[in-house]
Image (tube, helix red, strand yellow):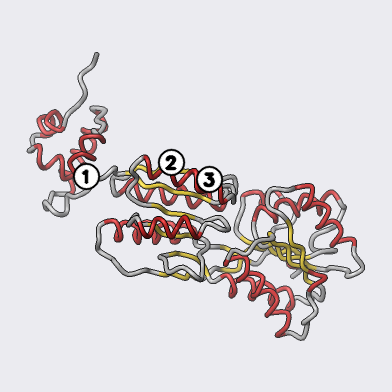
Amino acid sequence: MRKKTSLKDIAGAVGVSTALVSYVLNNREKEARVNADTAREIREAAKRMSYHPNQVAKSLKSGKSLAIGVIMADISNPFFGYLARTIEDESKKKGYTVIFGSSDESMKKSQRLMETLINRQIDGFIIAPAEGTEPQLEYLEKANIPFVLIDRYFKNLETSYVVIDNFKATYQATEKLLENGKEKIAFVCYKNKLQHTKERYRGYVQALKDHGKPDVKKLICEVEFNSPAYFRDKFEGLLNASTKVDAVLFSTNTLSIMGLKLVIDMGIRVPEDLSVFCFDQSESYDLFYCPISYVHQPLEEIGQRAVQILFDRMSNKQNTYQQVILNAELVMRKSCGK
């Protein structure tokens, strides 16, 4: 069996000390004031010699697992897939492994994932919490396990989180449709009590009220999560109703994709018969015959800020809660009618 490459082997190949190699491969070369060319040479030698760090030894030395747990609400949603990639990349830069799980918006599944990850001795969590998981987060707080919430949070819990201004985003999207002359703007959302859903709903309603359109009940389509048949019945009924909907704002990209498929099946033309505004970007929009307008969330920044806050908490650099609210951007395309 081939002998595993050690730090000493790399040091000998490059002609430097073992300590210097250790600093570089742990991304601490600035502390030791290592020359950039030397650092590059060390990394190239490590790659060429197929060096793999001994994670068990590193964990024993630091007293940490060098792993964090990430629980996404629905990993099949491209939004969470993009976020997961950013979190993994940022954590890797800090020498950490990421263990992912998807709660599929289920409180019970979230509980099982959390218990499994705690038993794996992970050092902290980044969580997009499912509805009803407040007691799970309270447990983490009492157990002194650092965590940061992303995408959504609970108003009744004091926690660190990174989210966007959901009220402002849907208010602005609704206002754009109104400015384009739309009179009957429908809103399609999931039926839950999560804060980001409430804020998006509130932004939509407020924009209509501010423009003299207070009667919105018949234009709101609330659907169950992970129930395509239920969605089809509800959304088809909305489009066929006497309300004569001329625009629709989808509150998530999964709802957007299901809705666009149904629009095609029903022979409805976008934007001639129906204007469309979606939440979150998706590669699927590029496959639709009409360029889709959408709310763009700064996913890279959300992931980066969440990782930094978590690592600050894990290293005790930051003991206070950090609550970050970022702005989203409207990407205007042909589906809005202008």
Q: Quadrant of the C terminus?
A: bottom right
Residue depicted at x 24% and y 30%: 51
Q: Secondary structure at mark 1?
A: loop
Q: Is residue 16 left or right of residue 308?
A: left
Of 110 and 260, nearer the camera is 110
Residue depicted at x 34% and y 54%: 145
Q: Amino acid at mark 2?
A: Thr
* Residue neighbourhood size for the residue with mark 2, other residues' Cα within 10 Å, grouped as few (<14), some (14–19), many (≥20): some
Q: Measure the C-alpha gap from mark 3 to mark 1.
A: 27 Å
Q: Secondary structure at mark 3?
A: strand
On residue 48, which mark appears?
none
Residue depicted at x 49% and y 43%: 112
Q: Measure the C-alpha gap from mark 3 to mark 2.
A: 13 Å
Q: Count of labels shown?
A: 3
Is label 1 or label 2 in front? Answer: 2
Q: Is residue 314 left or right of residue 166?
A: left
Residue 244, horizontal then vertical, whole percent: 88, 69
Of 1 and 46, nearer the camera is 1
* Residue neighbourhood size for the residue with mark 1, other residues' Cα within 10 Å, grouped as few (<14), some (14–19), many (≥20): few
- Which residue in the structure is indicated by mark 2? 116
Q: Amino acid at mark 3?
A: Ser
Is label 3 or label 2 in front? Answer: 2
Q: Quadrant of the N terminus?
A: top left
Q: Is residue 185 left or right of residue 87?
A: right
Mark closer to the chain start, 1 or 2 = 1
Q: Secondary structure at mark 2?
A: helix
- Which residue in the structure is indicated by mark 1? 63
* Residue neighbourhood size for the residue with mark 3, other residues' Cα within 10 Å, grouped as few (<14), some (14–19), many (≥20): many
Q: Amino acid at mark 1?
A: Gly
- Which residue in the structure is indicated by mark 3? 102
